[in-house]
Image (spheres, rainbow, N blue to C red):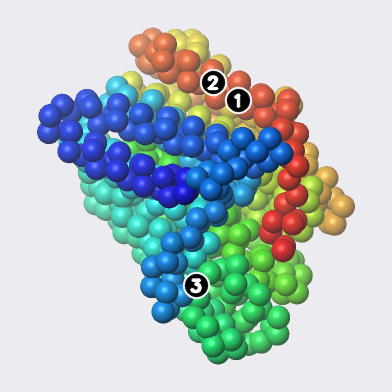
Amino acid sequence: MILPFLIFVPLVGGIFSWLFQYYNNKLPKFITIFYMILMFFINIILFINDVLPKLNVFSTYVFSNKFCASWISSFGINFSLYADRFTIYMIFLVILLSFIALFFSYQEDYKKSGSFYLNISILVSSIIGAFLSTDLFFFFCFCEIMIFPICFLNIFWGLKKIDYDNKIKSIKSFFIHSQISSIIMFVSILLLVNYYHQISGIWTFNFNVLKKSFINKSFVENIILCGFLLSFIIKIPSIPFHTWMPNMFLYSPKGNIVDLVGFLSKLGIYGLLRFFIPISGNILHKIQFFMIFLGIVNIFYGTFMASVKNNLKHILAYINISHTGIMLLSIFNFNNLSYEGLLLYIISSTISSSSLLVLSGRLYKKTNTYNLKKFSGLWNSISLIPSFFLFFSLSNFGLPGTGNFISEILIFVGLFLSFPKISILLTISLIFFAFCSLKMFHRIFYGDLKKDFKTCDLSFLELFLILFLTLLLILIGLFPNFIFYNFNFLNIFFN
């Protein structure tokens, strides 16, 4: 019974935020913070239920990690939800990123703030719904719903001091890519449902039932698998479907930026793990080389483009594309060590990348530019932002003691067991990645000071949150076993 609350609490909270904006424009922000805290405690209960089931503290029907309500039973569509440890971690990440977005937009004076937070709430609700859904119809619906608040946030609350026509073009590009991905996914789902109906006479959208029908590896099954694979690759986004991401990074408001990094790119990874791998069987080994090649291309292309760009947000967007390459390598390596590294990498890279985006947002607020040519010698004027910027840049390519370091070690070792040459190649890519990050840092904070930016350092509240993210990244690096405790990824994704 508790799982629907994770979807409907933000939705109801968003509606209240929208209504109360007419009474006081500041109230929506506090309403959003309140329901986010509520969701955090609900997720804590789910986590305790999963990690410590022997205690039997919350294992009643009310706090079950499963939920099913019949909707269109004649066509087999049910509101089915399920949360295992992997899903719980992803929801924790959603809530954490939402808090970051809220805290770093607390000084923003948004016009019609209730509408802004309503869109944030719908986005959070839909992404959590997609993570929880085991019914493919609802998974598709939640993926569709999240597209619209992102577009509205960019149109109405995106950066204003830019070319409006280019902003609209970037939103159109995002919308078209998302719709193509959704159409391919929907056709694949219908083919899968119809295929199961032909062999069993039963209509159902329940993925746990549908995946059992994939045993013949017929032509239809291969078409369905290609559809799922292509749809999720577009969502990640992987090359050559990545073109919408850099400009969406550039034109989005700060809160939405964090959500984009944490939500959209991870949803494609989640879809591959949750829906593509369990039904792929032997075809996985046939496409393994291609997917690993695609991962390597993403890593080197993202790193190269990040090293030649002058816009700070474009650089961070291409670094994010490079990260997706490492995740693709982990997914298609098929061993538990790589999957443990992948989970840590998703959490750690999201925290470090989001922190860099937040810090770049603070720089923009005072300097009104993301152009690296206009920055120089900022460390002579400010101290806190450069210090944290350096820490998160270093952790992005595996600073020892952080979660990124442990995750990359696990991924490299897991990859070395299967593909030692590719593992060595991946290690070399880190050198280029380090060069790119340090070059970016050097251009912003070293050199001659062009203008005095003493007022653009962090406030007390911003410093508190950045310190929290720093400690979180270090804690994950020092105690990774806490995340892996009593958890086998291969049993989850391959059974």
Mark 1 sits on what residue?
Answer: 472
Name the N-terminal-most of marks 2 and 3: 3
CA gap between label 1 and label 2 equals 6 Å
- Judging by the rendered image, the residue that carries numbered circle 2 is 468
Q: Circle 2 sits in a helix, a strand or a loop, which is it?
A: helix
Nearer to me, 64 or 492: 64
Amino acid, disc 1: Leu
Q: In this rendering, is residue 447 above or below 75? A: above
Mark 2 vs mark 3, CA separation in Å:
41 Å
Q: Earlier in the sequence, mark 1 or mark 3?
A: 3
User: Residue 259: horizontal and vertical position, in percent?
Assistant: 43, 42
**Circle on res. 205:** 3
In the figure, is residue 116 to the left or right of 411?
left
Asked if residue 492 lies left or right of residue 354, the reply is right
Residue at the image position 59 percent from the left and 74 percent from the top = 210
Q: In front of the other: label 1 or label 3? A: 3
Q: Nearer the viewer, residue 353 or 240?
A: 353
Relative image position of residue 406 (x, y in whole percent): 74, 34
Tags 1 and 2 touching, CB below 8 Å = yes
Q: Quadrant of residue 146?
A: bottom left
Residue 450 position within the rendered picture, expressed as x and y whole percent measured from the top left? 40, 17
